[in-house]
Amino acid sequence: MASVNLKKIVKKYPNGFEAVHGIDLDVKDGEFMVLVGPSGCAKSTTLRMVAGLEEISGGELKIDDKIMNDVAPKDRGIAMVFQNYALYPHMSVYENMAFALKLAKFSKAEIDKRVKEAAEKLEITDLLDRKPKDMSGGQRQRVAIGRAIVRYPKVFLFDEPLSNLDAKLRVSMRVRIKQLQQQLKAEGKDSTMIYVTHDQVEAMTMGDRICVMKLGHIMQVDEPLNLYKYPKNKFVAGFIGSPAMNIIKATVKVTGTGVEAVVGKLSFTLPAEKISLIKKHTTLESLNGKQVWFGIRPENISASLVESLEQGNHPGKVITVEEMGNEKYIYFELEGFQMTSRVRSHETNEKILMNQVANFEFDMSECHIFDSESEENISI
């Protein structure tokens, strides 16, 4: 296994466009690190620089404490799994998995041992004689992973490997990849894994830590639950979580009795613990009357029916309701903003329908306040 260290890494193209802006990232020995972000955030470009498939314009890349900037891809101790599988169509599964080992001049006995071991781990032993065209997408992806495993790499690199699969198969394959990491670790073959995806659910369920990227910058690196509960900025708050966090404009009002976030005609009183956290970032005097971003996750908003807009403390008009079985997503309008409430189906006996008026209660202990200019979270 090996650590991967990126220090002030820059990617600049000949036309002057800078895709990656001096990022720093430390991936620990044996860690499963996920790079996540929207399309165009340079997560795949970053991965390809680690692999040696993209030239590094500036900064320093180390694998296992050795500088790798000018080292050929084949000498970096890495193996990469691509989005499109990249299997040789004229070769059998066995031949595809053995190909790199043959080039490295391993003995036939060692090649056979490694291929069969990998096939057993991935449950594709019965496919070894087949050609890629005779297999499903999920089977091809397992072959591509097996081709990487046989090399016993220090670092596995995954570039959106599940994006071509259907939803059900994606779930089973992400479980399989995570199981594979644990299995290799149990066998003493720890491998560091760096996994690129645009799917934040994939990132949350697979990563030991997650690196959230935006336009070639790193926005936050942390464990999944910390990213969810303590997002450092508005971008991370809005990107991590499904349904997304509700984030709306509000005005801070400091009174003799406390602090309120005012949205139109409605006021949300901040609890004492949130006020204490905000004071660590700024003074209440400088915040008074200032616009901020007010955020709260859908599961922290409960809903109950009322007969009219005048009856509720925080009344909103229901736009639509999505029944998910054990829970429902209620989309509603509050002071001109569209928001989402996520409630357990068994928590309310009331049938909340489209175009009805409901009262929405906010758990303010779970709210977030973001600075309107820097967009940094000033409530953590």
Image (tube, grey):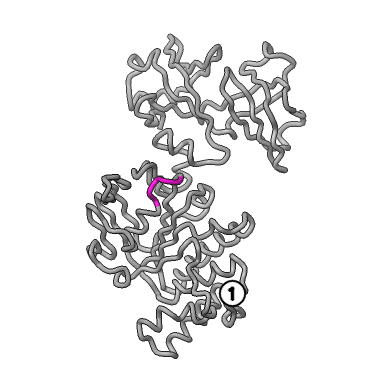
Q: Residue furthest front?
A: 15
Q: Quadrant of the N terminus?
A: bottom left
**Looking at the image, is 116 positioned above or below residue 230?**
below
> Is residue 149 one of those drawn in magenta?
no
**Looking at the image, is 329 positioned above or below residue 77?**
above
Q: Residue 283 appears in which quarter of the rendering?
A: top left
| Residue at figure coordinates x 56%, y 22% from the top left | 337
Residue 155 percent across, percent down from the top left? 37, 66
Q: Is residue 181 left or right of residue 371?
A: right
Is label 1 in a helix, a strand or a loop?
loop
Instruction: Name the one closer to the observer, 78 or 140.
Output: 140
> Is residue 41 one of those drawn in magenta?
yes
Label the magenta part by its dominant secondary structure: loop
Q: Quadrant of the C terminus?
A: top left
Instruction: Name the one closer to the observer, 323 or 20.
Output: 20
For mark 1, does the 10 Å Cα neighbourhood hold few (<14), some (14 to 19), or many (20 or more) residues? Answer: few
Residue 301 percent across, percent down from the top left? 60, 29
Residue 331 visible in the shown view: yes
Which stretch appears magenta? 39-43
Residue under circle 1?
123
Q: Is residue 176 left or right of residue 304?
A: left
Instruction: Name the one closer to the observer, 365 or 23.
Output: 23
Residue 10 visible in the shown view: no
Q: Residue 75 appears in which quarter of the rendering?
A: bottom left
| Residue at figure coordinates x 35%, y 82% from the top left | 104
Identity, as a three-letter code, of the amino acid under mark 1: Glu
Residue 307 percent across, percent down from the top left? 74, 16
**Looking at the image, is 145 positioned above or below residue 320?**
below
| Residue at figure coordinates x 36%, y 17% from the top left | 287
**Looking at the image, is 145 positioned above or below residue 213?**
below
